Image: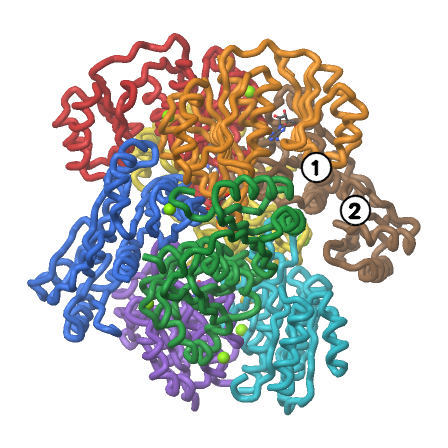
Chain colours: A orange, B blue, C green, D purple, E cyan, F red, G yellow, H brown
């Protein structure tokens, strides 16, 4: 990791043995290591090898934080519509927290229930960066983007069925957002959104 | 036309000669004929052959109405975000009017400018059926659908560029709408929306 | 739920614990709650927590109806070709019934066996709204739409293989229907069709 | 051409000069030559070089027939819904005729107007092979296939707009036909259907 | 079944109970019943209920033949490249046999090993209809189509990986065949090919 | 425009008359107006009506700036590989400049010529936000993202042919970037990138 | 150009002025310059500015060769089926020649006319590298690959219509080739094939 | 196998019994047999039947080498970014070794960590052919291709999630590579790359 940033392991498709090995090797170079998309079979071996690591089941993250970063002085908002998108929202939120950005979660703000979003809008506007997570039609970032001036990082999720095509409908909706100030990361890439949000939050 | 409904001609891909011939043949069977997607070259010949026909340039419609239908007693709302989607919105609106449904146009209601939509919401709620026309991310029907109880007919348009894929992004957004009570017609199918809206409005 | 409508839970991707919690919370606000796409593991816990709830195995619905809605005075037809599309057809039919619309099921009407459809056509014509469910080539809504004047809600299903692409072939067929008065909901979205049919049926 | 069959030239993307040259070269080997998809610029040069050639404008075919094949004793039906699909239907029909199969055209048989199809069904049933041409949702081959016992050759056309995707919707509909005895050729491939129909008709 | 043809059941997505019920109901109307895509769990129940039925494991077919059809006097060739495409090839072959068409199997004829195909070409040419089954690039029907005069029914299979996209590459290859006389059925639709081949073989 | 930001017009699909009207109406509300994707026919009428407007031919922008914004104190880098991507790069750069962010252009940095990119890397690293514009395989943002710590806004372009699919290849490449800190806007959306870059640059 | 290789300009989307400027700048650094996909408007200006340049109309190439490379001692075969694929085949062939590899053209070898291919197979086998160009179903590289031991570079072309999808069918066919020793370049990328063939030919 | 090359079995979709049978039959004709994509259930039976066969678990290969080929005198480089792409990289590497080409593995060269790639570039440049394996955005072959003169064989992998679409993003990136001298094989086709690399390496 150039310049002291934490190391990150992409857990998908790695065996438990590989995970423990890579985590050990990275931990010897950097005090903070974050593993994403940790597969079920790898959780126990990692926690056994690194007893000071923390597992976040909802987001499939394991964090090893031996050196707490100086906290940022401004906040990152994480907005989503509800239970279904929560794993990705939490992946984004915990990543940002791990990197030292305080977060504010607004998790009941759906497009079809505007009043709940409007009730939280001042909370969201008080943040410096806004992550918006949405599946199905992916309209939430456009609506939020029209209400705030902060940069919006849109995260499409694979939540849905039929013509949601595993997140493609949400992804396309976000790329075509008519609101300015919105950019997009890969489907279900909560990690990428949290990482970028912290980057921007610390500028 | 079974049961006295007007006849409709699909103008795309038909020569001016074919258009005039078919229009004449239909006009002899039914007092009202609507031609959609009329190509430029066919306009003059049709208007010359049918001097009592009306041409609507913005929507590429030509209407021959020799027998005004009994007007419906309730209204159809047609909602869109602005200039770009206007041709499709007008195709829907004029079709509904042609079939005897009074319409209410709300043409400046974009997702990224919620205040304008909210300012018109009572007007929309006063209608019995709501047509929502949108291109790009196609989020408007979800937002409107969450605010009204009437059936919402969503019309994706091919307005946009890049990953809008000629209306596919909007179409997918609408099919995946998280608002209940929304159904969808083909990309740019203003006619189909207006026809169905009148059907429902007259139930 | 604005204006006393029942609450609906989207069961896919929710844990049994989440389902029971959300159902309890909604039941405290609204007398009627419908859970769709209920996963197998959640059925027992929900029925244990809500002994007055009804489970409909064929359609993956669980309904809690503590306040029977005033029945509509007109009927909704639900049409499909046979056994394969039945789960989606039943999801539509039971949703409409749950919301108070009487339904008429015509479940053996395939495009390649027109005589059976024609034998039922008067039954279908007697309904105020028609839901047509079809997989594979999705041609049934066009044929039905050409025979009835009622609004047709087309539901593509993921039934098929090969170039049916999980319902895409049926979806595209329905969006391109040459019959007027047809609109479309998402692949396998029986709930959405039943909800909208009741909306229209009660206008 | 192995075994005396006529030679065929694919006219798309060939210059007028190339067309005349190839046509001359083939005409010296085979008494009958058919050029398909002849581009506008090539028509005059070909007709000038081969005064006994016949141009069929609606189908973009040019036929040079110096040796009339023995006519088949059974007929090929060509069925479509109307004006828009006519160019492809005519390409199929004239190809079959050119190869010696008498044809019967039924050109007003749409899925949404079943009564017209049913009125012609005996005519169609009297044929040995049936070509069905359809754009938009491409449902016609399924309906016809359910009514006849002859092999059905389905030809999707690029007629339509929006989610017809240049004929893909019709193609998928036909590939997923629930009627047995249906096979499919490429979008707009009237030539291929006419060629195969004659092959089967002469078995 | 109009005109005494056997009845066919589509086994995919049907429960064992549904299979036995439908099979019984059809067997009471028609002496011959063919079940395709029979799921593993349904095999035993069906064979228990219909002891005179035959199960073909390689092709997932179960045939109940109580009335042997008059055999056709000409043959159907079934051509494929090898082990991987065999299930689909056998589905086609047994369907044709079940309907009374004698078949000839040429199962080692790959495009990249032309000598084996050429060694069998006279056998294939002696047949009245040719079914060609191929996965991956789907080139075999074009090569065979260039060597024979009989109608060729091309069956793409889902055999392959990566950019074969579950049979789409083979399907597209076959639809774009430069050989005349080739038509195509759905991916993995051995049944449809066998049915149509018998139809043509009996003309 | 909430909070004094400039107004923006999307020029695509608008008639010259509509452009002049909308521009006038916006100019009366906001001192700064930017028109994007201005079609050729609209340029003269706009410049005639607004003599103080500036036209940027390479990027299809017309800017009316009557109130120069306070310049940002940090820079935005705009990186691309060369001539082909220049229109989109310039759209991004001029948008950022129009909004008051000084920009640094590095326009000869292709992935296949790393030495040129490495020669400019210190210039790029000195900027607070980096826009990377790339067509074809869209690999440049990943390479740049691995070399800088600033947030990277990736803009896919429609430059390319064949399997570039109008920018889809580049878009997918960028969404799947293995470098952290990268987010993506729509294909050819230079405006969106410039707008967001200024937003972030002013935090 | 590292290591004395010729410089190449991608002509698509470049203005005549840009072409002349870039060509001049490259010619001052390297004695040999090749411009690909030269647009019509740029031909005259380039030939006027570089009178010793050669224009190859069929392949849209302009070559400036001031230093003839040492010829390779082995040959590159370029194989295609006929007139339609010729522009891409010639782009490949002339590129290879320009780089010093002698070429052998076999331009009448279609998959549906195997005898012509087999008649030329010894000529092809005598070459060290084989380029195979094909549109429509793209089967030719598989057939050739099965007959030769040399590396085969497959070039899909956009020739075709309907489900050829601008070369996608051919591309997929080639990527899924069952013949070993085949690799693929972009649709219509004759230049890339010729460049790589020369690279391999000179090993 | 024409000309004494080893025989290869495609293990996917073959039963253990089929594998053992085919392997035995091929081993009787050729001294060297390679089985690819060997499914887990087939490993034991094959090793039991052929005790001198070697199983390579990481790459799903089983090799039976009874006649060691004369080793090539030049090397093949195999380059990838890390753990995730290793199975495909190893399939390529072992295939090339099996065919007698010595290989050099560079397995930690990611696009976002250029310094590691640059540290190994001389090792790579010393090879005669370079295989580059990459998932996600597939940018590595472009970067490597710009740094070496050897032919580059690009292998996209299905590693990734979301918009990687099972390797499609990487495949498209590679087909659109702006580096010359790059060609592409199917997604996850390590075998094809190793086979072709050996072919070229032995020229
Ligand atoms: N969930 C994730 N999505 C996208 N990129 C990731 C994710 N987790 C880790 N990464 C990136 O992958 C790199 C580690 O990949 P690896 O070496 O395969 O563990 C990190 O530097 C991150 O940039
Ligand atoms: N099967 C379904 N398909 C589409 N939308 C649904 C479905 N079931 C429920 N919904 C919608 O999803 C909302 C509930 O989502 P959730 O809060 O995730 O349970 C409801 O208000 C419905 O509008
Ligand atoms: N419209 C068409 N669609 C598909 N294939 C065609 C068509 N016209 C001609 N062909 C085939 O293309 C071959 C001639 O191609 P060419 O040599 O390029 O003129 C003929 O043998 C036909 O099999
Ligand atoms: N027809 C072509 N297809 C693909 N790549 C090309 C083509 N022509 C040139 N190139 C590549 O594009 C580079 C030049 O691009 P440019 O600087 O935009 O002219 C050359 O170095 C070639 O590698
Ligand atoms: Mg905003
Ligand atoms: Mg609503
Ligand atoms: Mg109707
Ligand atoms: Mg039939
Ligand atoms: Mg043939
Ligand atoms: Mg970075
Ligand atoms: Mg070979
Ligand atoms: Mg290179």
Mark 1 falls on what kind of element?
A: loop
Image mark count: 2
Q: Which mark is residue A13?
A: 1
Query: Between E119 and B22, which is closer to the camera in this rendering?
Result: B22
Q: Give the crowd class for mark 2: few <14, some 14-19, many >=20 residues within 10 Å.
A: many
Chain letter of the residue beneath label 1 in the structure image? A
At x 16%, y 19%, the residue is: F52
From the top left corner, tell me how far across and down residue B108 is, in percent: 25, 37
Question: From where the camera sits, is residue E43 visible?
Answer: yes
Q: Give the crowd class for mark 1: few <14, some 14-19, many >=20 residues within 10 Å.
A: some
Instruction: Give residue C162's quadrant in the image.
Output: bottom right
- Which residue position is annotated with label 2? H61
From the top left corner, tell me how far across and down residue E84 is, in percent: 70, 61
Q: Which mark is residue B189?
A: none
Kindly indicate whether the residues beneath marks 1 and 2 are on one polypeptide chain.
no
Q: In this view, does B45 lie to the left or right of B6?
A: left
Give the vertical position of H86 relative to E101 (above or below).
Answer: above
Q: Is residue G37 left or right of residue H141?
A: left
Instruction: Give residue H167's quadrant in the image.
Output: top right
Quarter of the image with the C terminus of chain G is top right
| Label 1 – label 2 distance at C-alpha | 19 Å
At x 51%, y 39%, the residue is: H176
At x 56%, y 72%, the residue is: E153
Question: From where the camera sits, is residue H80 visible?
Answer: no
From the top left corner, tell me how far across and down residue D173 is, in percent: 46, 64
Mark 2 falls on what kind of element?
A: strand
Q: Is residue G141 left or right of residue D117?
A: right
Quadrant location, ligand no. 1: top right
From the top left corner, tell me how far across and down residue F104 is, in percent: 40, 15
Give the vertical position of B63 relative to B118 (above or below).
Answer: below
Q: Is mark 2 within 8 Å of ligand 11?
A: no
């Amino acid at each position: 990791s150039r310049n002291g940033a934490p190391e990150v392991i992409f857990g998908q498709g790695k065996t438990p043995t590989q995970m423990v090995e890579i985590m050990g090797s990275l931990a010897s170079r950097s005090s903070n290591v974050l593993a994403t998309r940790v597969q079920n079979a790898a959780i126990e071996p990692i926690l056994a090898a690194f007893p000071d690591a923390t597992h976040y089941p909802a987001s499939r993250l394991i964090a090893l934080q031996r050196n707490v970063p100086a906290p940022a002085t401004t906040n990152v908002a994480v907005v989503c519509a509800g239970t279904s998108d929560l794993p990705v929202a939490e992946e984004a939120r915990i990543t940002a927290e791990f990197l030292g950005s305080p977060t504010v979660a607004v998790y009941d703000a759906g497009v079809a229930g505007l009043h709940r979003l409007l009730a939280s809008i001042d909370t969201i506007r008080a943040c410096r960066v806004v992550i918006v997570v949405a599946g199905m039609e992916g309209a939430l970032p456009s609506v939020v983007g029209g209400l705030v001036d902060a940069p919006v990082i849109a995260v499409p999720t694979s939540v849905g069925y039929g013509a949601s095509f595993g997140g493609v409908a949400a992804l396309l909706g976000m790329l075509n957002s008519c609101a300015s100030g919105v950019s997009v990361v890969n489907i279900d890439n909560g990690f990428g959104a949290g990482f970028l949000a912290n980057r921007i939050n610390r500028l």
